[in-house]
Image (spheres, rainbow, N blue to C red):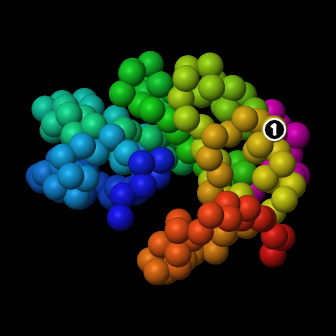
Amino acid sequence: MRCPELRVSVNLFPRQLSGPGLESVLRESAGGDAAFVELEVDEPLLTGLVQEAPAHFAAIRRTGAAFVIDHYGRTLGAISLLRHGFVSGFKIDKSLTLELGTSMRVRMMFRAIAALGKSLGLSVAAEGVEDTAQRAFVTTAQSDIMQGNGLCRPLTAASFEALLLTEDDSMTLTDS
């Protein structure tokens, strides 16, 4: 089953990213064009790949897959990767989302990080959205994507396929 609007995000571990064959797996799994695939990579790992294995990095990029900086805001160096055109977006770390209800400073940081991404034309995602207050804030901050158990509990493959096939797209957030 292939849904043209569906994007697939894959969290990569160091050995998966640095090992041989990732580009082949991407091409084979995606039917030749992995443009709908987002590779979520922590900033230090992505920096290392760009600097230490540029040929491997280029081969992965040629598959069409996009790189997304995972856990943005966890490390200080992540901003340096935004200077390059190969990053299509970032996910604001759940440690920041968790503190939205208790820290004005974190709310200001979250807004600033989201605004930075939007001004650069990047996709901005928020990790760890667990309740309606966080959802409202993240929406106001103009995040494109939200992730978290407060939106939907993990699904089996069969349940996910059934969800895709329904015409009712009114999934609602419930406070846990």
Residue 39 higher or lower than 52, as above or below: below
Q: In front: 91, or 140?
A: 140
Start-end of magenta stretch? 98-108
Q: How many marks?
A: 1
Residue 28 lies left or right of residue 103; in this view the side is left
Q: Residue at x 22, y 40 (%)?
A: 63
Q: Residue at x 34, y 35 (%)?
A: 47
The answer to whether residue 171 is visible is yes
Q: The C terminus appears in which quarter of the rendering?
A: bottom right
* Image spot of residue 12 (x, y percent): 34, 56
**SS for tag 1?**
helix
* Image spot of residue 6 (x, y percent): 46, 52
Q: Quadrant of residue 48?
A: top left
Residue 115 higher or lower than 156, as above or below: above
* Image spot of residue 109 (x, y percent): 74, 34
Q: In front: 36, or 18?
A: 36
Q: The N terminus appears in which quarter of the rendering?
A: bottom left
Residue 129 lies left or right of residue 77; in this view the side is right
Residue wearing tag 1: 140
* Image spot of residue 65 (x, y percent): 31, 41
Name the residue type under label 1.
Thr
Q: Residue at x 42, y 48 (%)?
A: 4
Task: Confirm whether the magenta stretch covers residue 173.
Answer: no
Residue 87 lies left or right of residue 126; in this view the side is left
Q: Residue at x 69, y 26 (%)?
A: 115
Q: In front: 132, or 163?
A: 163
